[in-house]
Image (tube, rainbow, N blue to C red):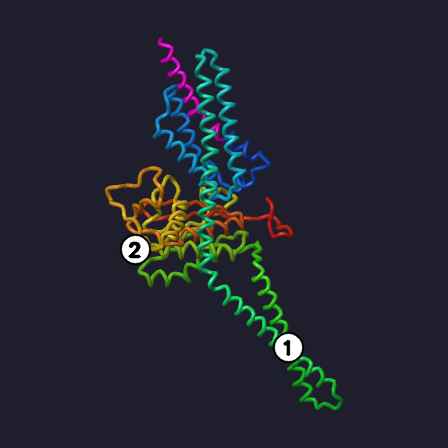
């Protein structure tokens, strides 16, 4: 047999072997990541969310082995780069930091490298070029993965920062007025406190008078009790105001019924949906006892529901909650699904597209949005701001709202996933812990 053809066949056999070992490789990778003390976020993810886009990366690696030793086509290389970038995007959504992502890629390369070495030991008949070619392909995949994930992280961080800067610029004009109002509020509080203290002093002095008639004594006592109660209430309000203005946002973990909270929220927002000709459905068990921060859960759910109602012209929004195969036994899922136009169809990057578009429109406020032809679908890898296949363009701020949800999720150890297709609506799933360990003095609990 021709030697070149034999090398081709042996590389193809290696690719087939790796495909047959897919489940074992993914399990070994997960175990290595879980054992790494530098990676913390992965333990909070259900298996499906953890694996995310890695099977597509492995598919690309196996296709590369089938194609060797021929040079890689530009289309295949571009697709591989996009797969790597999508993994970086998904990890950013899930709250990973850059160090965790790069170490995760390293563990994947080590697991695949060990599998290649084991295969080489079991197949002594392999032609000399086979394993060097496979190792080189593995090195290229790992390098591309780290490079594209890193680039994706920095791009998303910049986009998010630009969106937040735009919001800050919009709020800057209100800062002076807010400061004036705050100063006036403190002046009024001080005035009211002085007034109540004066009443207390007057009532105390009156009670100290000798020969005071009993009806007047009773009146002084009632006045004193009322003033002390008012002082206590005022002091509580001033303390709460000071904490709020200091920017403190501790999480308050306690048992509560998530189903009851979400049902009440949907009932409160249903009138708004009906005013816009939309439906708002609430589906889930009537009781879902969990531990968590009910205030932050309500803010997350309300943000998602209002965002969905705002950008849904027809149909409506469905809110579901409860257990799911995706969430696993330690988590429960909240899902908000709309029938709106959906985000743009990028390579698995709806959140990135929303943030990109919000930023791009902020730079070009006066420029009209680009309306692509229905016969011109968005090519793979094309930048979101170049074309949008949906019939309705996203408005500025849609992506920033999701960024806020992401930050709230991070505060309570929740993760979220977003899927969307043009004309098919958007689905956001948030996975919450069912219980927390006791919090430490910082308000954070440890698993």
Q: Which quarter of the rendering shows the N terminus?
A: top left
The stretch in magenta equals: 1-26
Foreground pick, 424 / 351: 351
Where is residue 330 drawn, in percent x and y?
Answer: 52, 44
Tag count in the figure? 2
Q: Going 41% across and 34% down the picture, which residue do you hit?
A: 83
CA–CA distance in space, label 1 to label 2:
56 Å
Q: Please indicate whether residue 224 sits to the left or right of residue 354 in the image.
A: right
Q: From what the image shows, is residue 247 above or below residue 212?
A: above
Specify the quadrant of the image occupied by residue 212. bottom right
Give the answer, above or below, for where 3 lies relative to 138. above
* Residue placed under numbered mark 1 in the picture: 194
Residue drawn at x 35%, y 46% is 385
Looking at the image, the residue that sits furthest to the top is: 1
Give how far across and how far down residue 82 sits, in percent: 39, 35
Q: Is 132 in the magenta?
A: no
Instruction: For label 1, count other residues whose C-alpha is less than 10 Å away and answer few (under 14), some (14-19) or many (20+).
Output: few
Considering the numbered disc 2 on the image, is that residue within a helix, a strand or a loop?
loop
Seen in the image, is 171 located left or right of residue 357?
Answer: right
Mark 1 or 2: the one toward you: 1
Where does the image place residue 38, in percent across and percent down from the top left? 58, 37
Q: From the image, tell me which residue sits under label 2.
A: 314
Q: Is residue 2 magenta?
A: yes
Mark 2 crowdedness (10 Å alpha carbons): few <14, some 14-19, many ≥20: some
When the figure is inspected, residue 181 is found, relative to residue 343, above or below; the finding is below
Would you say the magenta stretch is mainly helix, strand or loop?
Answer: helix
Does 239 sit left or right of 130 as displayed?
A: right
Q: Quadrant of residue 191?
A: bottom right
Name above or below for residue 118 compared with residue 251: above
Q: Quadrant of residue 279?
A: bottom left
């Amino acid at each position: 047999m021709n030697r070149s053809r034999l090398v081709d066949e042996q590389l193809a056999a290696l690719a087939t072997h790796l495909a047959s070992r897919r489940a074992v490789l993914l399990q070994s990778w997960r175990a290595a990541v879980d054992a790494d003390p530098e990676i913390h976020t992965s333990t909070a993810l259900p298996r499906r969310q953890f694996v995310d886009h890695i099977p597509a990366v492995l598919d690309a690696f196996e296709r590369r082995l089938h194609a060797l030793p021929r040079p890689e086509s530009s289309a295949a290389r571009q697709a591989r780069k996009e797969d790597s970038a999508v993994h970086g995007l998904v990890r950013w959504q899930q709250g990973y930091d850059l160090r965790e992502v790069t170490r995760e890629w390293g563990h994947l390369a080590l697991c695949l490298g060990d599998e290649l070495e084991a295969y080489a030991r079991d197949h002594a008949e392999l032609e000399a070029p086979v394993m060097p070619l496979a190792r080189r392909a593995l090195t290229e995949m790992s390098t591309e993965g780290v490079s594209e994930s890193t680039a994706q992280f920095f791009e998303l961080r910049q986009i998010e920062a630009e969106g937040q800067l735009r919001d800050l610029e919009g709020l800057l004009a209100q800062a002076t007025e807010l400061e004036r109002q705050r100063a006036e509020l403190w002046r009024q509080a001080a005035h009211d406190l002085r007034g109540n203290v004066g009443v207390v002093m007057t009532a105390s002095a009156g009670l100290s008078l000798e020969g005071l008639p009993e009806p007047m004594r009773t009146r002084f006592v009632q006045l004193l009790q009322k003033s002390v109660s008012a002082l206590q209430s005022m002091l509580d309000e001033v303390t709460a105001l000071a904490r709020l203005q200091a920017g403190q946002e501790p999480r308050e973990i306690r048992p509560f019924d998530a189903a009851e909270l979400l049902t009440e929220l949907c009932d409160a927002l249903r009138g708004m949906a009906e005013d816009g000709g939309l439906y708002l459905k609430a589906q889930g068990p009537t009781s879902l006892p969990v531990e968590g921060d009910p205030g932050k859960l309500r803010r997350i759910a309300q943000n998602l529901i209002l965002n969905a109602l705002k950008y849904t012209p027809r149909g409506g929004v469905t809110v579901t909650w409860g257990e799911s195969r995706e969430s696993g036994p330690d988590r429960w899922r909240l899902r908000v699904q709309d029938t709106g136009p959906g985000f743009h169809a990028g390579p698995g990057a709806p959140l990135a597209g929303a943030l990109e578009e919000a930023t791009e429109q902020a730079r070009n406020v006066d420029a009209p949005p680009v309306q692509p032809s229905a016969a011109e679908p968005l090519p793979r890898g094309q930048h979101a701001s170049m074309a949008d296949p949906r019939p309705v363009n996203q408005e500025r701020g849609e992506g920033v709202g999701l960024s806020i949800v992401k930050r709230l999720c991070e505060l309570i150890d929740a993760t979220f996933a977003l899927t969307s297709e043009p004309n098919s609506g958007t689905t956001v799933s948030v996975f919450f812990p069912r219980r927390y360990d006791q919090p430490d003095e910082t308000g954070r609990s440890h698993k």
